[in-house]
Amino acid sequence: MRPLLRYFITAAHSGPLPLMGNHWSGPTTGDTTSGMKQKRQYAALPFRVAEDTVEVLLLTSRGTGRWILPKGWPKKRMAPHKLAMLEAFEEAGVKGTIAKRAIGHFHYVKRMERRPDVQCRVAVFPMHVKMVLAQWPEMDERQRSWISLTQAAGMVEEAELSTILESFSPPH
């Protein structure tokens, strides 16, 4: 019998599961093939509906200028969806109502300045924007832009996030 190669399978809305042979080879924290530990983050998907057109708000990252969703690290005693809403306020200057359940997850590598890079698994919570602020905490560090779902899917670097954007339909 031929030895099995190390490979990944991806279940719907879950991260890559490293397998060795016929058994699970990684801890529940989510090791990756590069040896990076997987950390969790929570993101808001800020959206608005204007004349039957859905637009989402993307913003630039501080370090690389990539187009991203507002997101952040977990905080003690703060629910994931509430943290995502707080990040939307701080990073993008928007307020609104946010879903309590994530609509999906995506993975990316967080580039760290003075520490090793970190593999992140990001849960995405849709947020219906009710207010766009003229001033917000990180306004001098980022750009923001309202764009169509199709445009947004083409602007983000993460394939899994692109898929979430392409399939997004706001709750009624």
Image (spheres, helix red, strand yellow):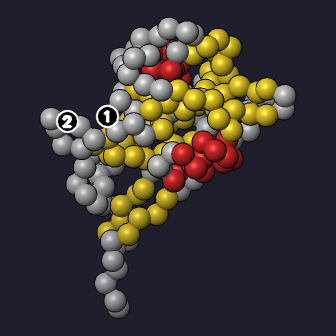
Q: Which residue is mark 2?
A: 113
Amino acid bearing label 2: Glu
Disc 1 or 2, which lies upstream in sequence? 1
> SS at mark 2?
loop
Amino acid bearing label 1: Gly
Is mark 1 in CB contact (under 8 Å) with mark 2? yes
**Rendered residue at 48%/38% (across/down):** 67
Q: Which residue is mark 1?
A: 63
Residue 166 badge: none
Q: Quadrant of residue 51?
A: top right
The image shows residue 136, relative to residue 3, as above or below, that is above
Q: Quadrant of residue 74?
A: top left
**Rendered residue at 47%/10% (across/down):** 136
Query: Badge 2 local density, few (<14 within 10 Å), some, or many (20+)?
Result: few
Tag count: 2
Residue 80 in sight = no
In this view, the residue in front, 152 or 39, is: 152
Residue 117 in sight = yes
The image shows residue 54, relative to residue 137, as above or below, that is below
**Rendered residue at 84%/32% (across/down):** 52
Residue 158 at x, y percent in the picture: 47, 49
> SS at mark 1?
loop
3D distance between C-alphas at marks 1 and 2:
9 Å
Q: Say which quadrant the C terminus sits in.
A: top right
Residue 172 vs residue 40: left or right? right
**Rendered residue at 34%/89% (across/down):** 2
Residue 104 at x, y percent in the picture: 57, 42
Residue 60 vs residue 168: left or right? left
In this view, the residue in front, 34 or 9, is: 34
